[in-house]
Image: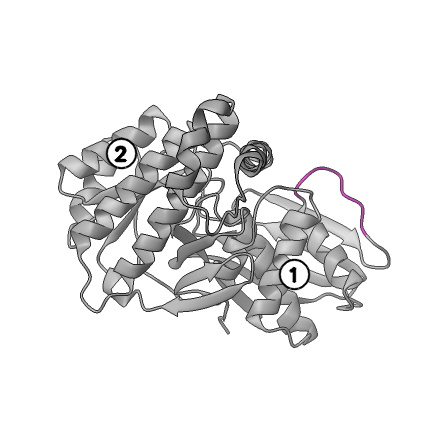
Amino acid sequence: MKISVPGRICLFGEDLDYTNLEVITAAINLRMYIKGDFSSNDYMHVKFLDIKQEDKFHINQEVEYRKKREYIRSVFNVLNRNGYHINKGVKAEIWSELPIGRGLSSSSVLTIAWIAFLNELFQFGLKKEEIAELAYMSEVLENNEGGGNMDHYACSLGNGMYMDCSTRKREMIDFSYLANCIVIGDTNIVKKQLVHTDRKININTGFGYFSKFLDFDVKTTTYEELEPFFSQIPEKPLSHARAIIKMRDITREAYKELTRKERDHEKIGQLINDFHRELIRGFNNSTEMTEKLISESMKAGALGGKIIGSGFGGCVLIYCPEKQQEIANIIEKCGGKPYIVSIDEGIRRED
């Protein structure tokens, strides 16, 4: 049996998912694959073909973690605890088209793909939304990480999505018009891992200051209401919390633009630029290579560019209607690795 799951781009919404705000995502046609079957013994045996590693453990008890972020093991434990019992051995191979550690949700995709594979093999009957929630539990909660649930729903459900991360209320968006609009540029710099926990602390500290001055609600309090109090808040919590409010407003404006019958590509590009500006102003999370890929793409005719994911390397999104190949060439000349992508479906059985 063979299962695949797409990576995702966050058009608008980095750092908004774990602050319980709205995000706009799209699944892309760079996918991760799992192929396997039941084994003749009582072991889970998984081979990671791209990195030439493997994991093997017995199924008769909750498995121990040898290090952080062992998602094959955390999925096994979370499924069993939630009544989805794995009572037969499994052998599987995993490989990916996604660049690893570059902001395209490879960790979430791995977690989702493993759950989706076991769901089919053991006939658990899980819906895609349930797989997304179990993947969030397995990746984030089980490992005490600071991320949100955006990636798990975006990759499980696929296509375009606008989601309120506090309620899980979703609206699927037809992004077919983006078919010739997006290039991913890999900086070839592995992004920093686990930055969300520190960011979350500073954001919540900033929100705490906001609450001292007025009846603060992250969903409804306006930037203009908060601005008079900025001078009374320490720099780092202020920069983080202020960025969240700014990016919240940009995302909401982008939703209106992306769902119009007649979209304005230049306006969409400008909103992408605005979001990137607030990301780096708030979190100082760009690199020289990141800015080079974006600026050179803009000079070549792209309409917008932004960091994807937590930053400090990883990938950038370039919005370039009808100029994908030209921009891909520019990214390559700059020393990056380009991916011309299109929007794709979510979890898929391949056999």
The residue lying at 45 percent from left, 41 percent from top is 244
Q: Pointer 1: what residue?
A: 134
Assign the N terminus to one quadrant of the image: bottom right
Whichever of labels 1 and 2 marks the residue nearer the N terminus, that label is 1
Q: Is residue 66 magenta?
A: yes
The residue lying at 66 percent from left, 66 percent from top is 118
In the rendered view, does 146 fall on the left or right side of 32?
right
**Dot 2: what SS?**
helix
Disc sitting over residue 293 in the figure: 2
**How far apart in space, not on screen, are marks 1 and 2 (Cα)?**
36 Å
**Whole-percent x, y for residue 159 in the image:** 39, 65
In the rendered view, does 55 fall on the left or right side of 202?
right
Identify the amino acid type marked 1: Leu
In the rendered view, does 252 fall on the left or right side of 235?
left
Considering the whole magenta stretch, tell me its main secondary structure. Answer: loop
In this rendering, is residue 166 above or below 215? below
Q: Residue furthest right?
A: 60
Q: Is residue 167 magenta?
A: no
The 10 Å Cα crowd at callout 1, few under 14, some 14 to 19, many 20 or more, is: many
